Image (cartoon, rainbow, N blue to C red):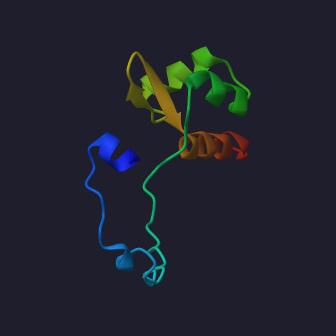
């Protein structure tokens, strides 16, 4: 009755309802190398490096630190923060 009320056709072939249908075998996904990179805002980069945000902005402007434009601000790749941290830790 519900089927008729909803406008669905009433199934007359009830023999197919209880039939076993084997599920397809699970296929393991192929690993894909991600090209995503971690980024932080200049304030977070400054905190990680132990310097001020203004110093980070000066380094970006001078080309000493790579940054990615993101709308009205920039983001700094975490790999770049690590590189600068290693440079600063290296004795001269």
Residue 38 in percent (x, y) is at: 54, 43
What x and y, as percent, mark residue 30?
Answer: 43, 75
Q: Is residue 56 left or right of residue 15?
A: right
At 46% across and 80% down in the image, what residue appears? 23
Q: Is residue 12 above or below residue 90?
A: below
At x 29% / y 68%, what residue is drawn? Answer: 12
Residue 68 position within the rendered picture, expressed as x and y whole percent measured from the top left:
41, 32
Res 24 → quadrant: bottom left
Viewer-proximal residue among 59 and 40: 40
Q: Residue at x 68, y 39 (%)?
A: 88
Q: Nearer the viewer, residue 87 or 82?
A: 82
Instruction: Place residue 27 in its image quadrant.
Output: bottom left
Q: Is residue 25 above or below residue 91?
A: below
| Image label count | 0
Direction from residue 3 to residue 73 in the image, left or right: right
The location of residue 18, given as percent across then percent down, is 46, 78
Task: From this view, report whether residue 67 is shown above or below residue 11.
Answer: above
Q: Quadrant of the C terminus?
A: top right
Tell me what residue is drawn at x 45 percent, y 36 percent: 66
């Amino acid at each position: 009755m519900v089927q008729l009320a909803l406008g669905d056709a009433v199934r007359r072939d009830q023999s197919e309802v209880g039939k076993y249908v084997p599920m397809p075998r699970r296929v393991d996904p192929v690993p894909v190398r991600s090209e995503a990179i971690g980024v932080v805002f200049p304030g977070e980069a400054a905190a990680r490096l132990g310097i001020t945000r203004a110093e980070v902005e000066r380094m970006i402007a001078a080309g000493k630190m790579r940054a990615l434009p993101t709308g009205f601000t920039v983001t700094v790749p975490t790999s770049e923060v690590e590189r600068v941290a290693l440079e600063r830790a290296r004795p001269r």
